[in-house]
Image (tube, helix red, strand yellow):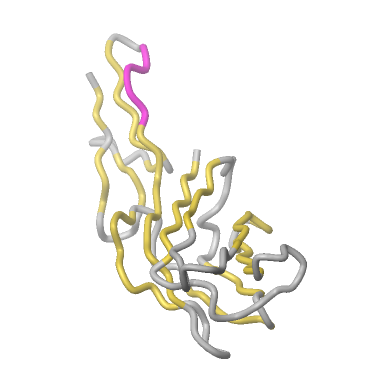
Amino acid sequence: MVIRYFDNFNGDWQDVTGTIGSSLVITENGFEVLQLNKKYIVALTQSGTDAPLVTTTYFNTIGTITWTRLGIGDYNGNLTDAFIGNMPKIEGSIGMVDSNVIRYFSLYKTNNSNVALRTWLSDGSTQSDDILKETTIEISIY
């Protein structure tokens, strides 16, 4: 059985032979029996013209993503070559800003080093700041 383990110093999975990869893979007799992927699960808050701020890190095996504000309701998450490969699972939930207004966001990969984060008012057409309030997002790299 070969078990790869997480190396906290560089953010990669590494097995006892020194082989590095983006997933934790356990094999037995040449067959893959378990694969765990890199994940980034955090809560974000954004206010005014500030960039989104990570307020709580729940789980992070990807690395430190740098968030910047590009414009109204338009943000970028950057970590050099962190998003190589498939990234079909990006999830999140909106915390209620107030009891009468529903807020929306989308999060998607733009290239191997960046993810885009967009926020809207409840009409779905007007991008807006001040939407993210302890909003949990999850990025998984496969």
Q: Where 13 sits versus 2, above or below?
A: below
> Per the image, is 98 magenta?
no
> In percent of the image, x 25 and y 24: which residue is there?
2
**Where does the N terminus fall, quadrant-wise?**
top left
For residue 69, side relative to residue 52 (left or right): right
Q: What predominant SS class does the magenta segment belong to? A: strand
Quarter assignment of residue 24? top left
Q: Which residue is drawn at 54% across and 74% down?
A: 131
Closer to the camera in the image, 17 or 112: 112
**Residue 79, image x and y in percent?**
51, 66
Q: Is residue 108 above or below residue 100?
A: above
15 and 89: which is toward the camera: 89
**135 left or right of 124 in image:** left
Q: Nearer the viewer, residue 35 or 3?
A: 35
32 within the magenta span: yes
Q: Eyeballing the image, is 100 above or below 7?
A: below
Residue projecting furthest to the front: 100
* Picture residue at 42% right of the left edge, 70% below the top: 44
Q: Number of numbered discs present?
A: 0
Residue 85 coordinates in the image, percent (x, y): 58, 43
User: As drawn, which residue projects farthest toward the top?
Assistant: 29
Residue furthest bottom in the image: 49
- Which span of residues is magenta-colored? 31-35
- x and y, in percent, of residue 107 in the image: 60, 58
Image coords of residue 94 (percent x, y): 49, 60
Q: Which residue is drawn at 27% across and 14% down?
A: 28
